[in-house]
Image: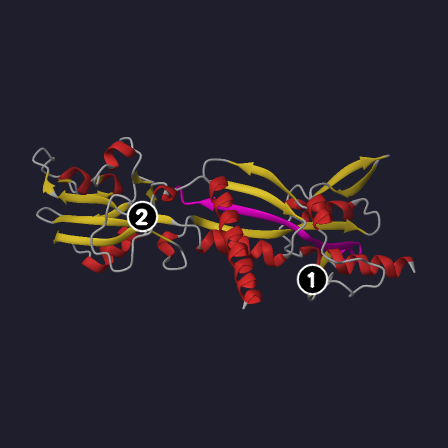
Amino acid sequence: KMAAAQAVEEMRSRVVLGEFGVRNVHTTDFPGNYSGYDDAWDQDRFEKNFRVDVVHMDENTLEFDMVGIDAAIANAFRRILLAEVPTMAVEKVLVYNNTSIVQDEILAHRLGLIPIHADPRLFEYRNQGDEEGTEIDTLQFRLQVRCTRNPHAAKDSSDPNELYVNHKVYTRHMTWVPLGNQADLFPEGTIRPVHDDILIAQLRPGQEIDLLMHCVKGIGKDHAKFSPVATASYRLLPDITLLEPVEGEAAEELSRCFSPGVIEVHEVQGKKVARVANPRLDTFSREVFRNEKLKKVVRLARVRDHYIFSVESTGVLPPDVLVSEAIKVLMGKCRRFLDELDAVQMD
């Protein structure tokens, strides 16, 4: 009976990695599926079990644990981060002159993918059919670069950096042109490309690029250039169990089967003994299953409701702001759904 209870518990809370497949992939803890378990939705129980732990955060990356939710909700967060948190990006390029070897439409596409350092929350979406932008929905940048020969270059030089002036067009050459009262609202240097060293095009003497860019607010669902993240992903927390003691040479061998830091080997009464130190570091290469002796002493699993999120911002907004914006978007979706239900009931 004890073994049966353990098997049920494993089925409910672990995704088990076997040698030839993955077991218990689907969520099964819905009401009435297991006798003796009350799986009805309970807000108090959810609030008690749910938690978010920030593991690491710097300027552009955030790693946090979200515990106590279903895969559907975790995936909703991931997808909202990728495609539904708005940013500003170049939408229209007015080309006055482009004699570089980069075609106009390729150049426009490259400019669209440059992340713009501007808080999208301070702007409105541009209305459909609006040709001219206003200060509340548009940012304007000018790019005007002309390549010339360097008169002071050495006669025998063949280095383009020495021979030419302005032969590389970088994002630092983009200048912000304030519209309306934008100069008063945004201090100098706040509206700019995120990185000033992105190469846009290369020129040779006599070639020039002269264009005007209009940036608007949009979401990644419409075009990838509006996506605020470089990556947003999650994985389940690894759970590694040793089913029996592993000693001696086998302990060393076991530690080599996993990522560094996952299995530690300790000296206990003159014998080497393996123990699981930090399963979180494991990438689950399943190398251990190639070892005939060791594959029987280890159980590899993942904790079903413990998600390790990695969010890497493009630099437009800090990653913690992106996550809170994603939560607001999800709340808005839930609210809209509830309103729809109310409207149907009234009908």
For the record, the magenta segment spans 293-315
Q: Name the residue carrying label 2.
A: 114
Front label number (1 vs 2):
1
- Percent coordinates x, y for residue 331 in the rendering: 53, 51
**Which is more toward the observer, 28 or 277?**
28
- Percent coordinates x, y for residue 215 in the rendering: 27, 49
Query: Which image quadrant is residue 31 in?
Result: bottom right
Residue 295 within the magenta-colored segment of the rendering? yes
Of callouts 1 and 2, the N-terminal one: 1
Q: Name the residue carrying label 1.
A: 27
Query: Which image quadrant is residue 313 in?
Result: top left
In what element is the residue under mark 1?
loop
- Percent coordinates x, y for residue 131 in the rendering: 21, 56
Q: Amino acid at mark 2?
A: Ile
**Which is more toward the observer, 93 or 237?**
93
Q: Amino acid at mark 1?
A: Thr
Colour scheme of this structure image?
secondary structure
Instruction: Give the number of callouts.
Output: 2
- Left or right of 60? Residue 286 is right
Q: Is residue 198 visible?
A: yes
**Which is more toward the observer, 11 or 340?**
340
In what element is the residue under mark 2?
loop
Q: Residue, x 17% and y 53% (percent of image)?
A: 94
Q: Residue, x 84% and y 57% (percent of image)?
A: 6
Q: Residue, x 74% and y 60% (percent of image)?
A: 29
Q: CA distance from mark 1 to mark 2?
A: 40 Å
In the figure, 159 relative to 8: above or below?
Answer: above
Q: Quadrant of the N terminus?
A: bottom right
Q: Is residue 202 visible?
A: no
Q: Quadrant of the C terminus?
A: bottom right
- Left or right of 84? Residue 52 is right
